[in-house]
Image: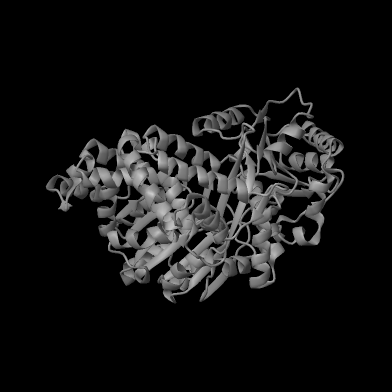
Amino acid sequence: MGFNYDKLYFPYKSVRQYQDLLIQNINASIESRKNLLAHAPTGLGKTAAALAPALYQAFNNNLNLFFLTPRHTQHRLVIDTLKEIKDKHGISIPVVDLIAKQSMCPQPLAKELGRTDFLDYCREARKDGKCVYYRNTRKVELTEEAEQVLADLLNNSPMHSEDFCAACADNKMCPYEMALELGKKSRVVVCDYFHLFADHVRNAFMAKMNKDLEESVVIIDEAHNLPDRVRSLMTSRLTTYTINNSIKELESFEFFDEAEVVRYLLRSFEGLVPNKGKESIVAKDDLVKHLTSLSGFSFEEVIELLITAGQAVREERKKSYTLAVARFLADWVVDEPDRVRIIKRERSRRGNEFISLSYCCLNPAQYTEPVFDESYSSILMSGTLTPTSMYSEVLGVSKSSVIELKSPFPKENRLTLIIPETTTRYSKRSDDMYQRIAGKLESLIKSLSVSTAVFFPSYRILNEVSNRLSISDRKIIIEQRGLSKEAKDSLLNSFRDSQGSVLLGVVSGNFGEGIDLPGDELECIIIVGVPLPVPDLYAKSLINYYDERFSKGWDYGYVFPALTRVIQNAGRCIRQSTDKGLIILLDERYAWSNYYKCIPADWDVKITKHPEKMAREFFKHQG
């Protein structure tokens, strides 16, 4: 085609199959100031394919480039690719790698506080001159020492956020303030979703770095995560756990009148939650009327009382449950469109009952659409961005083009089987069904000697099936709830070190996304059941909302997101062009047309009740 990839700052000697199409489409979209939705399967090299043309357009048109990822760990690949571009092309690329302010803070207390308590603590420490890191960095303007450190940091750009924070802390400088200053001088900003898509963060964030969306290209990596992430960011939730802690806190500080008001709030929760059933939809005024009639105060007076008391608590403790209560009540009375209010009885992991009240966001487009409309160009990319029409509608992506690329992996390196003999459908769950699933897993695992990961829809189903498994000749590693990063890494290393071991995990758990197990470290993935969300009031509200908006409630609100998680999980076993992988979908529903249509066409799926022979022949052929 005569397309000059070097001109576009491509970091490598050669371009992969289909990667060239992604590069050309991204370049054309930015050039024409359009948005692009790109379904680009694993192994295609999305990061380099996006950065090369985006940098070219940014330098040529004096634009800024924002590269957003859902997880801090994914920043590393972006920074490493930028370093390779810098080294190959000999160009200066000013870059800032930004993570959450709290994660960058060198103060020991930062790790102990909740997010909002930390932000309040930081604000007051700066205002009162109690933070040595901030004092050394800024006295209205940057200090001379900070200017010198900033010049060194700019000279060493691109830097990983960990290295940047360590360098700032070594010089007794505030990493976050220094990052914002570096951002003013940077062509590229690597950051998280919330920096641009949380309404209350974006405007201040952009202003502090002197950036303008109209002069910025925005790249969203793993964009299939964006709808759920934005809904979560913009949802408020309060539990009786926090309320009870607020009462204890207020009493310990002798705020007895305020504690009594919070007791009335607790009684309001107990009065609103249904006696029969676990949950119900409530109206704004249900809580307002309950609390005001019990307390004798107006709702606004209650909020003011709790803010005043909570601030007094925080001066001593740096953390206040009462302020968390006040913030929720302040959010509660704001009328936002496309939301639902739900009160619910729940149980903690220890089995203790509590009540939660949530003000849930249903429509992420309310927060994403302004970004896509205002930006110079936005690129949304993922290995599971199908159907692209759903993401375009759900996120409000207008003036856009679409590209759906094939997998670069040889078809013969992957075998995908559907076994329609069992199901985890709620109406079919029983001891007999769990035993049948366990028996099928035993047969499959014993017929192969390769490292295998089995993902379940929930911890409950994982436990029901694993308790019935009888496999003595293989190392079995079982994921537990709430694993720390250290525990997760330890389990992963144990799995890697033992060839032929079996990992039992949960689709939305620690190992379903974001892990790399190339080569023979993972060669078989079995998905047990379909990881559909619990059909609770929130799920039903989402279905109803998308039915009203697009007449696609069941697909957009329920089935498609679950199948996206399945495809993400299945992709763990094929990460490199030389990898070989067996994917088994163990549920009859995968053969149903409304589920089957979500599976990528190039997977060449086979439906069978005799998978053991096909699996053995596949690995025999692979050598």
List x then y, in percent, for residue 562. 67, 53
Where is residue 9 shown, x and y percent of the image?
38, 61
Give percent across and percent down for residue 596. Answer: 76, 58
| Residue 81 position within the rendered picture, expressed as x and y whole percent measured from the top left | 41, 51
Instruction: Between residue 179 and residue 426, name the one nearer to us.
Output: 426
Residue at the far top: name it: 472
The colour scheme applied to this rendered structure is one colour
**Would you place residue 162 above or below residue 412 in this image?**
above
Residue 99 in view here:
no
> Residue 118 occupies which quadrant of the picture?
top left
Question: As rendered, which of 291 and 435 lies closer to the eye?
Answer: 291
Q: Is residue 431 depicted above or below 581 in this figure?
A: above
The number of numbered discs placed on residues in the rendered structure image is: 0
| Residue at image point 30% right, 44% down | 122
Res. 140 in view:
yes
User: Quadrant of residue 339 in the image?
Assistant: bottom right
Q: Residue furthest left?
A: 144
Q: Please give the name of the residue rendered at 31% of the width and 35% of the height, measured from the top-left corner.
A: 316
Give the quadrant of the C terminus. Answer: top right
- Front-lying residue, 427 or 613: 427
Is 378 placed left or right of 402 in the picture? left
Residue at image position (39%, 54%) is 190
